Image: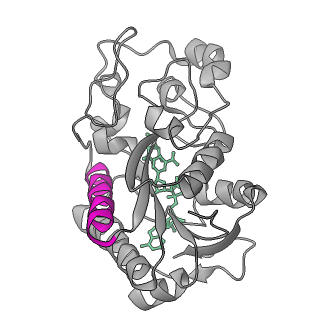
């Protein structure tokens, strides 16, 4: 497909949206921004809820692709997750289908497979094709998004790359994150690859840097042309000195999803 130039970025006011607003224009994108909250410094951003089907249809009109980050990004009640992440993502796909948008890059999450046992040193990396084991209603909604993407590819020919993001923050802040961290610069590299690779159909990838302590297989991401350049190991000494290595007997450390499996952080609203 020709390189997309105009990309709708949903969730533009959020943490990842803010990082990508800074980084993606260097790849040649003109970003159209959308969020239910005001986007600081962007008076032209579309302020709309994913429930607003008319606004979504207008927002996707004429774009080459959508980078869909909007939604509840932590655990919440089933009803809230249902509204924002399940119905909201459905509304976005319907708008894209109706307006002929050819590709969506969907922010899935490691929490779609969060109850997968954490690999120990020497274990094989977790493949993309591992069984879904959501750790929360939040993770469940990301599995729904991946299946919705598959349906819209099979039924309507709308392409998606579902990125099971690990932890994308400026720096890793825990020993677990040493395994799942995606530097913002690698995030931009991966989203760019996902927006431009040819013939993706529906492809699921893990989203992280090339961490020394990586838990999962990045080969489907690399097949899109993604070449990560960062490694969280640069932060390991400090984090391990502070918190120690992951504890074999601590339930918080037993699974890929970490403490989402035991005491998930709650969406504040
Ligand atoms: P965030 O919570 O900082 O941002 C989410 C944004 O979506 C917020 O600005 C919020 O106002 C907006 N939003 C929420 N519900 C909405 C609705 N109904 N309509 C319109 N906008 C709505 O989350 P963050 O960290 O920026 O994550 C972005 C996406 O990436 C989320 O979908 C999250 O699940 C996913 N993700 C992020 C990871 C990370 O490490 N940051 C890891 C795995 C997945
Ligand atoms: C996620 O899915 C969350 O959106 C993000 O805030 C982090 O908590 C991340 O997972 C993680 O697993 O660290």
Query: Would residue 199 appear left or right of 26 to someone viewing this image?
Result: left
Q: What is the residue that sits farthest to the top in this orientation?
A: 122
Position of the N terminus by quadrant: bottom right
Residue 144: in magenta span? yes
The image quadrant that residue 262 belongs to is top left
Residue 266 visible in the displayed image? no
Residue 255 visible in the displayed image? yes
* Residue at x 52%, y 54% (from the top left corner): 198
User: Picture coordinates of residue 90 (x, y %)?
Assistant: 32, 73
User: Picture coordinates of residue 242 (x, y %)?
Assistant: 58, 17
For the rendered model, the colour scheme is one colour
The image quadrant that residue 227 belongs to is top right
Q: What is the residue that sits farthest to the bottom in this orientation?
A: 54
The image quadrant that residue 206 belongs to is top left
Q: Nearer the viewer, residue 261 or 234?
A: 234
**Location of residue 248 with respect to 137 vertically, above or below:** above
Q: Nearer the viewer, residue 184 or 218?
A: 218
* Residue at x 64%, y 62% (from the top left corner): 3
**Location of residue 49 with respect to 110 vertically, above or below:** below
* Residue at x 61%, y 17% (from the top left corner): 236
Position of the C terminus by quadrant: bottom left
User: Picture coordinates of residue 66 (x, y %)?
Assistant: 52, 68
User: Picture coordinates of residue 88 (x, y %)?
Assistant: 36, 73
Residue 76: in magenta span? no
* Magenta stretch, overall SS: helix
* Residue at x 55%, y 18% (from the top left corner): 212
- What count of labels does the image hold? 0
- Looking at the rendering, the quadrant in which ligand 2 lies is top left
Query: Would residue 26 appear left or right of 144 to someone viewing this image?
Result: right
Q: Which residues are magenta?
A: 137-156
């Amino acid at each position: 497909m020709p390189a997309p130039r105009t990309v709708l970025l949903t969730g533009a006011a959020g943490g990842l949206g803010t990082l990508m607003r800074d980084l993606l224009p260097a790849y040649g994108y003109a970003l159209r921004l959308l969020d239910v909250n005001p986007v600081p410094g962007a008076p032209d951003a579309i302020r709309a809820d994913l429930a607003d089907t008319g606004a979504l249809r207008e927002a996707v009109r004429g774009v080459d692709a959508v980078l869909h980050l909007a939604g509840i990004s932590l655990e919440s009640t089933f009803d809230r997750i249902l509204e924002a992440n399940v119905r909201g993502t459905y509304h976005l796909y319907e708008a894209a289908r109706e307006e002929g948008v050819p590709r969506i890059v969907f922010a899935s999450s490691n929490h779609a497979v969060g109850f997968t046992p954490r690999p120990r040193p020497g274990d094989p990396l977790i493949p993309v094709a591992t069984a879904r084991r959501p750790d929360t209603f939040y993770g469940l909604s990301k599995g729904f998004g991946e299946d919705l993407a598959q349906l819209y590819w099979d039924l309507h020919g709308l392409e998606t790359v579902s990125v099971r993001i690990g932890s994308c923050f400026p720096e890793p802040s825990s020993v677990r994150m040493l395994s799942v961290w995606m530097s913002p610069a690698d995030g931009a590299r991966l989203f760019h690859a996902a927006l431009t690779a040819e013939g993706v159909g529906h492809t699921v990838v893990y989203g992280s840097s090339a961490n020394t302590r990586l838990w999962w297989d990045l080969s489907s991401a690399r097949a899109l042309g993604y070449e990560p350049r960062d490694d969280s190991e640069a932060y390991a000494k400090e984090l391990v000195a502070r918190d120690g290595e992951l504890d074999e007997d601590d339930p918080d450390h037993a699974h890929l999803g970490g403490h989402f499996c035991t005491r998930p952080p709650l969406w504040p609203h």
